[in-house]
Image (cartoon, rainbow, N blue to C red):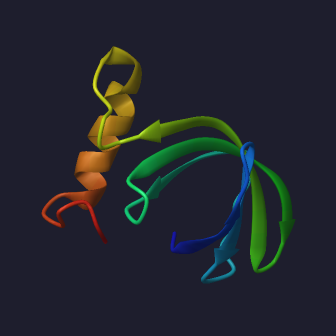
Amino acid sequence: MDVEIVDRSMSGLRLRLKSETPVSGDVTLLSAATGRAYEARVVWKSYPYVGLSIRRDVDMRAANGVDTAALQKLWRETFAGTGGSR
């Protein structure tokens, strides 16, 4: 899903959806622009915007270890061959 982060606070993100794609529940957002992965929950929707409550914020440039292994794998699969950007 293609989104743009339009606002960020300590506890949440406001996203602008590029298309009217259904989104709800728990989500993982990978941001090549910031080099971060966010595990979050959708807390409100008002198309084209979606509000997320951040549960975990991981700097993927420094991530290593068992607790981030699944995110590291997803990051590599998503950005393989792109140098971390897409």
- Residue 64's spot in the image, x, y percent? 28, 26
Above or below — where is 78 with respect to 15? above
Image coordinates for residue 24, horizontal then vertical, percent = 74, 53
Observer able to see residue 9: yes
Residue at x 76% of width, y 80% of height: 48
Question: Going 30% across and 57% down the picture, which residue do you hit?
Answer: 78
Looking at the image, residue 11 lies above or below residue 66:
below
User: For residue 22, which quarter of the picture?
Assistant: bottom right
Q: Toward which corner of the image does residue 85 lie, by quadrant?
A: bottom left
Residue at horizontal 12 percent and vertical 63 percent from the top: 81
Indicate left or right for 35 with 54 as reference.
left
For residue 73, side relative to residue 38 (left or right): left
Position of residue 83 measured from the top left corner of the image (x, y, whole percent): 17, 62
Q: Nearer the viewer, residue 7 or 86?
A: 7
Name the quadrant containing residue 33. Answer: bottom left
- Residue drawn at (33%, 16%) of the image: 66
Q: Residue furthest top?
A: 66
* Residue 22 in view: no
Left or right? Give the position of 38 relative to 65. right
10 above or below 46?
above
